[in-house]
Image (cartoon, grey):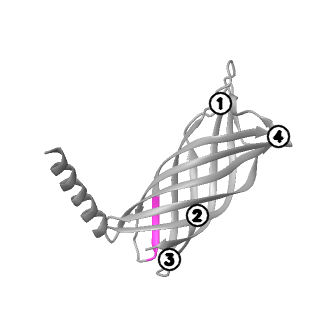
């Protein structure tokens, strides 16, 4: 009985995936990131840091106008605080919900979880003083051409306080503006 159930479930899964419009691709681009700092009710932002991001993406078309787009992206982020280089590197996993008002334009938004892979201030490791997970909201737009090329912009608004240093009540929230290009090589 268990084998029959697994066979039927597998059959429906394969049939569903074969009928779905799924695309796979790669992307990369420029990050302009910053960290919002709040200490004892005072808020400020250091100078922005320019870096990069690289990753892979999939797009599951639900209908002509709606899609789900999960991604896996390495993102170099941080800020420049009074001459100190604040470097954060994340593995980001956004799950975007896309709306296509036209054939080539896509407006997307959704949650993003970032896993902190490294953190340094002027080469000194500070990863132990930061939380390992960063939650944010991603909002953006993209143009996707029929030949598979895509490009766009996105803003990742940090929701999590990254500070995990004991006895320190400073709040740190990472925000990043991205410009990207990509290509769907399986369409």
Q: Which residue is mark 1?
A: 163
Q: Give neighbour class at mark 2: few <14, some 14-19, many 20+ (Cα, 10 Å).
A: some
- Tell me which numbered mark, 3 or 1, is placed earlier along the sequence: 3
Mark 1 and mark 4 lie on one chain; the one further toward the N terminus is 4
Residue 32 position (above or below residue 170): below
Residue depth check, mark 1 versus mark 4: number of the one nearer the observer: 4
Does the CB distance between marks 2 and 1 fall below 8 Å? no
Residue 107 painted magenta: yes
Q: Nearer the viewer, residue 75 or 65?
A: 75
Residue 105 pos. (x, y %): 46, 72
Q: Which residue is mark 3?
A: 148
Residue range corresponding to the magenta coloring: 104-108
Q: Position of residue 143 (x, y in %)?
A: 51, 73
Closer to the observer: label 3 or label 1? 3
Disc 3 crowd rating (10 Å Cα; few below 14, some 14-19, many 20+) is some
Which residue carries the number 4 mark? Answer: 123
Task: Say left or right for 71 vs 2.
Answer: right
C-alpha gap between disc 3 and disc 2: 17 Å
């Amino acid at each position: 009985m268990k084998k029959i159930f697994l066979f039927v479930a597998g059959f429906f899964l394969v049939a569903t995936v074969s009928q779905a419009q799924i695309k796979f691709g790669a992307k990369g681009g420029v990050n302009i990131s910053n960290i919002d700092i709040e200490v004892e009710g005072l808020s400020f932002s250091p100078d922005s840091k320019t870096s990069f991001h690289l990753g892979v993406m999939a797009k599951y078309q639900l209908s002509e106008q709606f899609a789900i787009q999960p991604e896996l992206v390495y993102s170099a982020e941080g800020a420049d605080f009074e001459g100190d280089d604040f470097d954060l590197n994340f593995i980001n996993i956004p799950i975007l919900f896309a709306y296509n008002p036209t054939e080539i334009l896509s407006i997307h938004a959704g949650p993003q979880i970032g896993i902190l892979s490294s953190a340094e201030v002027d080469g000194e490791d500070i990863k132990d003083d930061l939380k390992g997970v960063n939650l944010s909201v991603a909002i953006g737009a993209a143009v996707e051409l029929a030949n598979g090329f895509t490009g766009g912009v996105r803003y990742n608004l940090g929701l999590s306080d990254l500070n995990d240093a004991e006895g320190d009540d400073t709040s740190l929230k990472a925000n990043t503006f991205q410009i990207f290009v990509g290509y769907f090589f399986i369409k």
